[in-house]
Amino acid sequence: MKKVLLWLAITLLILSGCAPSLNNNEDEVVEKENDTKQPEKSIVPSYQLSDENYRTILPYRTSSSRGVITNQVMNRMDIGEMETGLRRLSKAYYDPEKYFFEEGQYLTSDMLYKWLDRNLTKDQVEDALNKRVEQIEKSGKEVDEEDKEAIRKELQLGLNPAIADDESKKQQKENPKYLTHILEHNFLKKNEDNTVELIGASIGIAMKSDYAFQTEIGGPTYHKKIDKKTMLKKGKQITQTVLERVRKIDGMSDIPIMFALYREEEQGSPVPGSYVAKTQVSGGDMTIGDWETVNEENILFPSDEGEKKYYDQQQLINDFSNKIQEYFPNYVGVIGEGFYVNEELQKLTLEIPLEFFGKGEVIGFTQYTYGLIQEMFQNYYELEVKIKTNKQMESVIYRDAGDKDPVVHIFDK
C-alpha cells in the first residue's frame, strides 16, 4: 500500500481543504422501499465531502444498467465526463444540501440495449417475428394475434434508424447510429417519518459526433461525421420518445426529470466531449418544451483548437513547458486539458510525463514545478498537475479555485 508524503508543511491545507465536512448528527437510519415494495433499512451518512457533493444512501445500490456505458461508449474519456457532467448539471435542479444521490434504478440493462439498437424495417420485423413465433411454438405454447402484436412492439424499440442492408456503405452513411447511451441518475429526499423517496431524476442522452462502421467482419472501418446541428435535432427527437417511455415505468410517471444531451468526441480523442443542451419537464408532463444551450467544452493543449480559441492559455502552457525543459531536458512535453463553461476556464489539468531515476529527483522536480505554478498560474480556476513516469504517478500538485497555495502529494513506493 502506498504511503503519501506531504511536502512543504502543507498538511494543514490538506486537512482543512480535502477532509469531509462533518455534520453534528450521527449517521441516520432510514427506510426505503426495495423491489418488493417492502421497507428496508438504509443509512444516510452524516459525512459530506463538501457542500457541492451529494451524499449517498448506504448500502450503496449500483445502477440497474451497470456496465452498459462501458459497452456502448467507445471513448473512455467520455464515460467519466458523461457521469460527472450529469451530476454537475443536476445541481441546478436538485440541491446537494437537501437531496441524496443514487445511481439509476429504473432503466435496466435489458431495456437500454433494446432502445440503443437500430429499429427494424417492416420486412425485418416480420422475419424476426416468424422466428420468435417458431421458437415459442416449439416449446409447446400457442401464439395468438395479441401475442404477435406484443412481439412486434418489442422488436421496434430501437431508437437508432433502421436500414435494410447493414452491408451497404451507402445506407450506413445515410442512416448512422446517432444514439450511444442513456444514463439515469436518481435524487432522493428524507421525509419526516424517517423514510426516503424519489423526488426527481436526471437522464443524459449520449450522441455521436463520429459514426464508425464496417460493412463486413474484418473489413475497413468507415466514418460518417455528424454535425452538431443534426445531432441536436436527432437528440431532441430521441429524448421526446425516451420521456414517453419513461413515464410508463412505475415510479417515474409523475416526477420531474432533467434531460441533457451529451456530444461524444471521436473514439481516439485525448479529451472528452461535453453536454450541449438541457431541459426539464415537471412531474407528469409528457411533452418537452424549450431546450437551454449548455456552453461547456474540454480543450486539449497544445492543439490547433486550443491556439485558435484560447491562445493565452495555450501560450502559458507552452511557456511552462519551456521552463520545465530548462530544468529537465529529456521530457516529451506537457499535455494539458482545460474545462470551460461559457468560455471561462474552470479547471486546468496538466500532465508531465518524465523518466526518473530516484526519489530525490522526484522531490526536486516537484519542488521546481511547485514554484513555477506559484509564479505563472492564476488562482481563479482549479488546477491539477500530475507528474508521471511510464509506470505510475509520482506526484500531484493541486490547487482549488481561490486558494493561494497548492497542495502537494508525493507518492512513495
Image (spheres, helix red, strand yellow):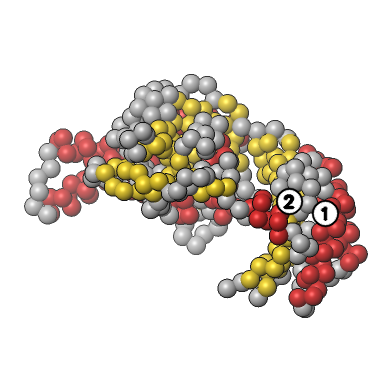
Residue 220 appears in view: yes
Q: How many C-alpha atoms fall within 10 Å of the one at disc 1: few (<14), some, or many (≥20)? A: some
If the image is split into quadrants, where does the N terminus sit?
Answer: bottom right
Identify the element where label 1 is drawn: helix
The residue positioned 52% from the left and 37% from the top of the image is 97
Relative to 364, 107 lies left or right: left
Given the image, on which type of amino acid does mark 1 rest? Ile
- Residue 339, percent from left and from top: 69, 44
Q: Determine which of the numbered discs, if any, sits on residue 399 in the image.
A: 2
Judging depth in this view, the residue of 61 and 313 nearest the camera is: 61
Q: Determine which of the numbered discs, if any, sits on residue 107 in the image.
A: none
**Image quadrant where residue 369 sits:** bottom right
**Mark 2 touching mark 1, by CB under 8 A?**
yes
2 or 1: tag closer to the N-terminus: 1
Q: Which residue lies under the disc numbered 1? A: 373
On screen, residue 184 above or below 217: above
Distance in Å between CA atoms under marks 2 and 1? 10 Å
The residue positioned 34% from the left and 39% from the top of the image is 195
Judging depth in this view, the residue of 165 and 81 nearest the camera is: 81
Q: How many C-alpha atoms fall within 10 Å of the one at disc 2: few (<14), some, or many (≥20)? A: many
Residue reaching furthest to the right: 326
The residue positioned 30% from the left and 32% from the top of the image is 248
- Residue 389, percent from left and from top: 71, 70
Residue reaching furthest to the bottom: 357
If the image is split into quadrants, where does the C terminus sit?
Answer: bottom right
Judging depth in this view, the residue of 280 and 232 nearest the camera is: 280
The residue positioned 45% from the left and 41% from the top of the image is 100
Residue 225 appears in view: no
Given the image, on which type of amino acid does mark 2 rest? Arg
- Residue 400, percent from left and from top: 71, 47
**Image quadrant where residue 191 sits:** top left
- Residue 101, percent from left and from top: 46, 43
